[in-house]
Amino acid sequence: MDPAEVHYKLIRKVRIISNKEISATAEITRGCEKVPAARTVNWKARAASSWCSRCAEAEIFTSVGQMTDLIFTEKELVQSLKEYIRKEESRLVQIKSWASKLDDLTQTATADPEGYLSHPVNAYKLVKRLNTEWAELESLVLQDPADSFISNMSVQRQFFPDEEDEKGAAKALMRLQDTYKLDSESISKGRLPGVTFNALLSVDDCYDMGKTAYSDHDYYHTVLWMQQALKQLDEGEEAVVSKPEVLDYLSYSVYQMGDLHRAIQLTRRLLAVEPTHQRGGANLRYFERLLGKEMRESNTEQPPVAEAPIEFRTYERPVGYLPDRDIYEALCRGEGVKMTTERQKKLFCRYHNGNRNPRLLLAPMKEEDEWDSPRIVRYLDALSDTEIERIKEISKPQLARATVRDPKSGVLTVANYRVSKSTWLAAEDDPVVARVNQRIEDITGLTVETAELLQVANYGVGGQYEPHYDFSRRPFDSALKTDGNRLATYLNYMSDVEAGGATVFTDFGAVVRPRKGTAVFWYNLFRSGEGDYRTKHAACPVLVGSKWVSNKWLHERGQEFRRPCGLTEVD
């Protein structure tokens, strides 16, 4: 699949077409669709709320699966543009032919007007030309082959990404940059692992990335991307944006990062290129006053300003809101995994027949241990390619931005720490869904009668779900009154992922990587019903590829004899 910057550039390109090529606007109303009926009333309401909470925005960047439609949209627009060019060239050929013929004729006529018109045929043809043929030429000039192109654009424009999509895709690239410790040049030059189609970021792309960060007061990433834009400009790459524009943003952002000396250097370079730059001049005077004050207070002399180029990763990344960010991101990179030799000795593979389930006796599942405590197992050949394609086919039109439950209000809402699109499928929607549900029940030995609908998710550009618990920690959650808490998670991987996209458990340092057609299973609750806080997990950002998963959350109700209570709180 395409690397993340392909998605960003596609969204940016379509946004540019939308903003600059079309003056007419075509509005579309995106209505809410209801989620298929669930077996129990509370999960029906929950799924419907999740779907309809997201009907007002496009948020195309959150699903690679849906973004593929943009490729074909752009292809159609290119064909329409080529047809417009062909018609325009044909029209210009005709006009040039007219102009050439009339130029020769008028050259002859103006040399001796009376002599020319003394010939009655010439007199007739002059009158005819001015009365008829010039009117035809006027009509030809007034013809606008762009009408069909504009009309096609107006139709397609309703499906274009919006400004929030472009910002979201840019922020996704920055998230990948942070998580996988990629420098701006590696991303700009397309040097990513597992890529099939290479893609480059131009000076203008890098500049726009920096502006997106700047608009969020994210000076750390502004510096990284403005530096890259400046580097590519210094190497001679042509661009629409100018060096003074880049230096203007870069110098101020460097100042905001606390590097006053470097801010002065960059501002001086800005003024060397454009001496009349008003903001640059004002900033330089301000920076120099601040530096002078610092020197006086420290009783030191101002050092000479060096013109050494900025190195990448000069500044420390600001502390974020995520407490276990470093552990989470390290695991995503494959670092800090706590799989020891002693632990590996406890892990086995086996055939699993679901406690002699009739449907598994002749075709038992291949089961592999991924972790010993808490126990995480993987089932091979849990979904066939045909089943996967059918689930994706019926899910894709229904995908909507995935939501989370607000810990304070309990209301489902979108969040930046969960970037994907999802939908919910009931057994009644398709025989494949019913078959998958039955298989989950056979494998786990748990009833799916009180389970939630099968959730299907597709992760977009830099798609992720930061560390979270699957079980509810809100005892007053009304959704738990009927069917109880989320006892277990059954997660199907419906695609391979070229790079990134692993499921990581931050508490005990486990990494489970996507493998198409396999499924992983773990319990979220102890037998006592208490939450197992060790199961805090995350979906790492997808670096390269398109990640499709489907999961079933199995609830406590109905499992009383299938998974009886233990004798202690942590059994």
Image (cartoon, rainbow, N blue to C red):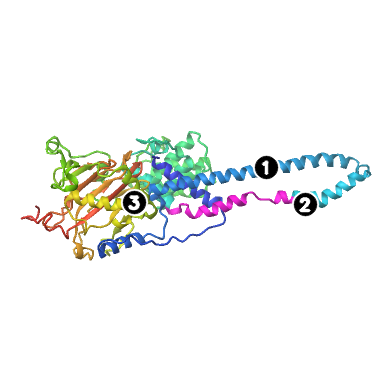
Residue 422 in the image, given as x and y percentages of width and height: 33, 53
The residue that mark 1 highlights is 90
Residue 135's mark? 2
Residue 324 in the image, given as x and y percentages of width and height: 23, 48
Q: Secondary structure at mark 2?
A: helix
Mark 3: few, some, or many residues within 10 Å (few <14, many ≥20)?
A: many
Q: Which residues are magenta?
A: 138-164
> How far is mark 3 from mark 2, CA to CA?
59 Å
Tell me the kind of residue under disc 1. Answer: Ser
* Mark 3 and mark 2 residues within 8 Å of each other at the beta carbon: no
> How far is mark 3 from mark 1, CA to CA?
48 Å
Mark 2: few, some, or many residues within 10 Å (few <14, many ≥20)?
A: few
Residue 419's mark? 3
Mark 1: few, some, or many residues within 10 Å (few <14, many ≥20)?
A: few
Residue 301 in the image, given as x and y percentages of width and height: 37, 40
Q: Nearer the viewer, residue 292 or 111?
A: 111
